[in-house]
Image (cartoon, helix red, strand yellow):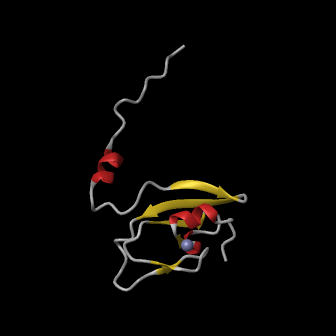
Amino acid sequence: MVAKRPRRNAPKREYRELDLNLVRTSLPKVEFKRGNEFQVQQTSGTNAEAGKSWLCPVCRIEIEPGLTHTVAWDLHRGVETRRHFHNHCWKLFDGMLT
Ligand SMILES: [Zn+2]
């Protein structure tokens, strides 16, 4: 029986990137909402093009540029379904993208 060796040499690149101001997003993860699978990512919004803003589909209030928020899309329907949510709104989101 071969013991599994811990991967102590795993690259720490991701952690280092998080320390940089240049980094705009956290690591993506997958969340389930009502059986729908969503790719979820946080963004600081600092990469917003001038004048660009997003309407949160939950509260229908605009997300201010520079505000850290959540970007999510339906994994099966594709990245075209991407929406920008306030972080707290994403938690409330019931999984029905319109
Ligand atoms: Zn909202």
Above-or-below relation of 1 to 78: above
Residue in view at x 39 percent, y 66 percent: 44
The quarter of the rendered structure image containing the N terminus is top right
- Residue 28 in percent (x, y) is at 48, 56
Ligand 1, by image quadrant, is bottom right
Residue found at x 28% / y 62%? 22
Most extreme residue toward the right is 34
Percent position (x, y) of residue 81?
Answer: 59, 73
Residue 37 position by quadrant: bottom right
Question: Which residue is nearer to you in this view: 35 or 1?
Answer: 35
Residue 96 pos. (x, y %) = 69, 70
Residue 5 shown left or right of residue 30 in the figure: left
**Is residue 57 depicted above or below 92 in this figure?**
below
- Residue visible at 42% across and 77% down? 64
Query: Relative to the observer, which residue lies in front, 91 or 39?
Result: 91
Is residue 96 found left or right of 63 in the rendered image?
right
Residue drawn at (29%, 52%), measured in percent from left and top?
19
Residue 37's place in the image compared with 52, above or below, is above
Q: Nearer the viewer, residue 7 or 38?
A: 38
Q: Residue furthest top?
A: 1
Q: Quadrant of the C terminus?
A: bottom right
In the displayed orientation, state which residue is furthest to the bottom: 51
Going by the image, does 93 lie left or right of 18?
right
Looking at the picture, tell me which residue is in the foreground, 2 or 44. 44
Q: Position of residue 80 (x, y in %)?
A: 56, 74
Looking at the image, how many numbered discs can be counted on the residues?
Answer: 0
